[in-house]
Image (cartoon, grey):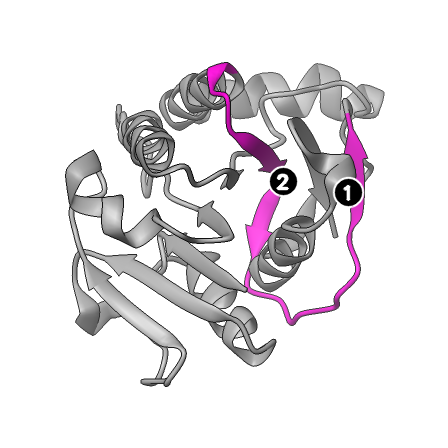
Amino acid sequence: MKITVFGATGGIGVHVVRQALGAGQHVTAVVRDPARLDVPAHERLDVVVADVMDPASITGAVEGRDAVISSLGARDLKPTTVARDSARSIITAMTRTGARRLLVVSNSGMFRDGDGFFVRTLVKPVAGRVLKEPWADMAAMEELVFASDLDWTIVRPPRLTDGELTGSVRSKIGANPRGFTVARADVADFLLRAVDDDTLSRWPVSIAG
């Protein structure tokens, strides 16, 4: 299987690259700075330096791929459009080349269905004020993905940790499973397993560790 990863130097993306290579897959990692990719050179790893915001720049990186995975998002609490702008560019490039399978990382914090009373009425309102800008960007990104004709899955994790890979997460379509955190390694594992899961096609799915 051939997979393209955007956000490959980030906390989730680097796990996607490592795990995909470990599973025998061919990976194209799209980066701005190759020096920041914490993955050793590998015969099945292609590192492409490109501007993800320019569809023409990434066309070659998505053409002919079995799946495209993006974990791009804000790195701080400032106003940003990185999630929506990168999604728009990736969708455009995939549409031009006929690539179909897209998986993107969002977050479950913006949604309250499935949450317990305390989380729904106290925790989430406070978090929403603190994370207003990155959540607004993620929401706009989701709308772009929803509107596309691609075979997409939106993966919504809660608070991310640097815990070890467990290979086991709870997931739910249409509501949040119980759980406040999930390891980045487990998000990557879920993304890779979701590539071939037809039941997740054109659905947002929330996960938790």
Name the quadrant containing residue 74. top left
Instruction: Tell me: 12 left or right of 120.
Output: left
Amino acid carrying label 1: it is Gly
Q: Which residue is mark 1?
A: 179
Q: Residue at x 46, y 59 (%)?
A: 3
Q: Say which quadrant the N terminus sits in.
A: bottom right
Residue 164 appears left or right of 179: left
- Residue 31 versus residue 20 in the image, above or below: above
Task: Give the left or right position of residue 168, taking residue 190 as reference.
Answer: right
> Does residue 151 show up magenta in the picture?
yes
**Cβ atoms at labels 1 and 2 below 8 Å apart:** yes
Disc nearer the start of the sequence (1/2): 2
Secondary element under disc 1, as helix, strand or loop, is loop
Give whichever of 152, 39 is nearer the camera.
152
Q: Nearer the viewer, residue 196 or 116?
A: 196
Task: For label 1, count other residues whose C-alpha is less than 10 Å away and answer few (under 14), some (14-19) or many (20+).
Answer: some
Residue at which label 2 appears = 158
Residue at (53% x, 18% y) in the render: 146
Q: Measuring 29% from the left and 53% from the top, which residue is drawn there?
A: 61
* Closer-to-camera residue (66/28): 66
Q: As shown in the figure, which amino acid type bears the numbered disc 2?
A: Pro
Q: How many marks?
A: 2
* Residue 182 pos. (x, y %): 66, 52
Task: Tell me: residue 85, above or below residue 47.
Answer: above
**Magenta stretch, residue numbers:** 147-173
* Residue 162 circle label: none
